Amino acid sequence: MTKKRRRAGLRLTEGGLDLLMPLHLWIGLTGHIERAGPTMQKLCPDLQLVGSRLTEVLEFRRPRGVQIVDDLRAADGQAAHVIFRAQPRNSLKGIVIALPGDQGVLLNLSLGISVAECVGRFGLKSKDFAPSDTTVEMLYLIEAQSAVLQESKNLNSRLQGAKIAAEEQAFTDTLTGLKNRRALDHVLAREITRAPRNRFGLMHIDLDFFKSVNDTHGHAAGDHVLQQAARIFVEETRTDDIVARTGGDEFVLILMGCDNEKILTRIAGRIIKRLQAPILFDGAQCRVSASIGITVSSRYKKLNAGQMASDADAALYQSKHRGRSCFTMFAPP
Amino acid sequence: MHGLVNRSIQRFVQETYGDDFWSEICRDAELGFENFESMLIYDRSQTEAVLASCCLLLERSRKGLLEDIGTFLISHPDFEALRRLLRFGGDTFEEFLHSLDDLHDRANLALPELDFPRLELRVYSTNSYCLQYAWGQRGFGTLVLGILRAMADDYGALVLLEHSTIQGEGGDIDRIAINILDAEFAEGRDFELGVGT
């Protein structure tokens, strides 16, 4: 003998409904809101939801064209997407459930993607969400992520600042690895304070025909030529000497402890000779040479970096005038 | 060690004892720099060197120092984000205590490299709890103690906290006995879910 077990329909107190679904709307057959979850009511503080007509409060994006309760009943079990007719027109997502008999329809909603904004605007608390709802977790994540992102942004901007500062303080020409103008000024100033105890030779070098290498073979070839020239300068000087690139194809050499004109001209001659050998780049033969102007510290009664530099330049231009590929020792007129 | 931990120590020392004192600690610890970045990872030896110099120059115990740093993290406006994230744990101090079980996973979601310890809450009664955890690095336990103390104040709860360490299989295990004397002792600080700012 079997006894058929009768199941009573699930019954829920209204308080239980509020806790389970704080964002629900219960719509009666007339299309009016019979009951609204507590959080739902918080979302429209200026409007008494219970008693209002559903379609006057919400605009249905999905299901489309909802006018009367029968339209909703037909959408039983379907996803819903609604927008408040009142500003700021927050959008909600949820599900439509047709209730048995003539009880109408239950609409359970959630804040969806507008959650962070709504929580701030309406001052919602964690109690306003069901514990089974992960909204608070989502808020936590949003906040954690934005805190981490902010820290990372701060780090990036500090690193950027540090990079710029480092570049400004750099003493090295990044293309050739030689000293740059800053470093040269530094060393020249130091050597001048040490003179006349320390003597030195100053050599200004311009690469000849460099522009045509760039124009004919491209900038990569030009860069390669500059690197090869830099290597020759370093090889033809001692480790204590200073080799600097001061401009596109301009170089300056300081030869420490050497004001012997014979030695200096010998070095200049070797540099020019080596530079005249074709430099290979990607199968192309790049041809350059050098014009050099030289002066020495012992020529001056009172040393002055600016004067020495302009004398070395004057000698350099003399070399250019004499047809390039040569050196000139500065001689006062 | 995560930069956040190092940065916390730095900001605590700077705010409490001044920038000059922090510079002195960096020199003593032979760091070679004075600014920890909270989003970079540093070698543990650097954290240890800084803590050792702090203890030496401040003549303070490591435990007491770390506890103060924990309190500082919750109460100083620089670290408001951290306080807020912890307040997500619940509306009352009791709920907050229960949320500590998830803190490891939550911290992992936000900052996987932080290596935050797994906290385990044991409930003896509605007023009596025990929090147990093992922070991989020895002697960081009182940092959590300081955080708990400050969070109790944040919720306005009057609590009694007692820290102890016991020998476990994988090293020392920290234990904090928690007794809530009055859950609504004071007003507490404000917390809104919405970011607002």
Image (spheres, helix red, strand yellow):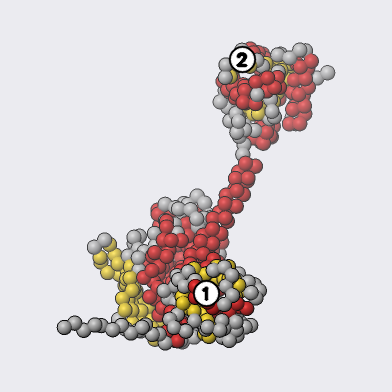
Any mark on residue A72, and which? 1
Between discs 1 and 2, the one toward the N terminus: 1
* Image spot of residue A222 (x, y percent): 64, 24
Q: To which quarter of the image does residue B64 belong?
A: bottom left
Amino acid type indicated by mark 1:
Leu
* Image spot of residue B84 (x, y percent): 51, 71
Q: Secondary structure at mark 2?
A: strand
Q: Nearer the viewer, residue A68 or A46?
A: A68
- Please, which residue is most extreme toward the right here? A333
* Image spot of residue A73 (x, y percent): 49, 75
Chain to which mark 2 belongs: A
Chain to which mark 1 belongs: A
Q: Secondary structure at mark 1?
A: helix
Q: Is residue A289 left or right of residue A80?
A: right
Using the image, determine if residue B64 lies above or below residue A204: below
Residue occupying image coordinates x 40% and y 80%? B94
- The residue that disc 2 covers is A285
Residue occupying image coordinates x 35% and y 79%? B178
Q: Quadrant of the N terminus of chain B?
A: bottom left
Spatial separation of the CA atoms under disc 1 and disc 2: 83 Å
From this viewpoint, is residue A195 visible? no
For the residues labelled 1 and 2, say whether their Cβ atoms are less than 8 Å apart.
Answer: no
Mark 1 Cα-neighbour bin, 10 Å: few <14, some 14–19, many ≥20: many
Q: How many marks?
A: 2
* Image spot of residue B155 (x, y percent): 47, 80
The reply to whether label 1 and label 2 mark residues of one chain is: yes
